Amino acid sequence: MPKFSYYFLKSQLDPYKKIFGANNKPMVYIANWWTPTSNPQKVIIYANCDEVAIYINGKLIKKQLPDAGPDTDYGDYDKGGNSFDGGNGKNLSHPPFTFNNVKWQPGILKAIGFIKGRAVAQAQINTPLSPNKITLSADTEGMPLTANGVDAIFVHASLVDKNGTVMCLDNQSLITFNISGAGIIIGPEIIKARGGIATVLIRANSIPGKIFLIASGKGMTKAYLTIDSK
């Protein structure tokens, strides 16, 4: 599962220059959970843009440059910065954008990235509400599940609210998996969520066919997934 650092590394790719094997383009990513807090907080944005603006529920909070030089909240200094290079981002192709003293409000936090004054990318996160359903996704990495009796994949059950927001603070809910058809579950069938996601390992049988998976949890709509083994 991609962590925040994955998107930091992705942000170091040039937004337009073609790079062999990389699907690089303008990008912006909010490296925060938008969850309740009584104190102002930092909002960290990873982007390969010139400027980034953040909005809360449609209201502009601030537009600023990346974390390098005197034009940022951190000022022009070399030590004690928040960037991955240990300083203020001078050694990075695309330093992060740190927005300080952002007061939390329930709703939507949006970030828009600009290159040469033009909006080129955006991202948003929502405040999680109560979970009401489960969604299932098979982590095949673009390769078919092989019916050889040993090939296996992870399947992720995400606990989401009515807006599709993952319940990122849920580390307690128990998800029960049931399987039938041309595959088996490796390990326990009841998994505790971590960060709103419960993950199970599925192995294919030696005969090709369809694998049927059901995930259920207390107070949530069940999720169904069909996987073909080849």
Image: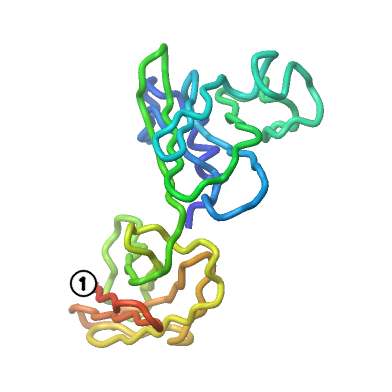
Q: In which quadrant of the rendered view does residue 58 lie?
A: top left
Pinpoint residue 229: horizontal percent, then vertical percent: 23, 73
Camera-side residue: 154 or 218? 218
Identify which residue is drawn at 42% across, 76% down: 201
Q: Is residue 61 above or below residue 33?
A: above
Residue 128 vs 60, above or below: the answer is below
42 and 200: which is toward the camera: 42
The type of residue carrying mark 1 is Asp
Q: Secondary structure at mark 1?
A: strand
| Image quarter hosting the C terminus | bottom left
Image spot of residue 12 (x, y percent)? 52, 30
Q: Residue 91 at x, y = what percent? A: 67, 22
Quarter location, residue 210: bottom left
Q: Is residue 223 left or right of residue 62?
A: left
Q: Is residue 168 above or below residue 184?
A: above
Residue at 30% x, 86% y is 179
Q: How is the image coloured?
A: rainbow
Using the rendered view, name the quadrant where residue 112 is placed. Answer: top left
Frontmost residue, 97 versus 89: 97
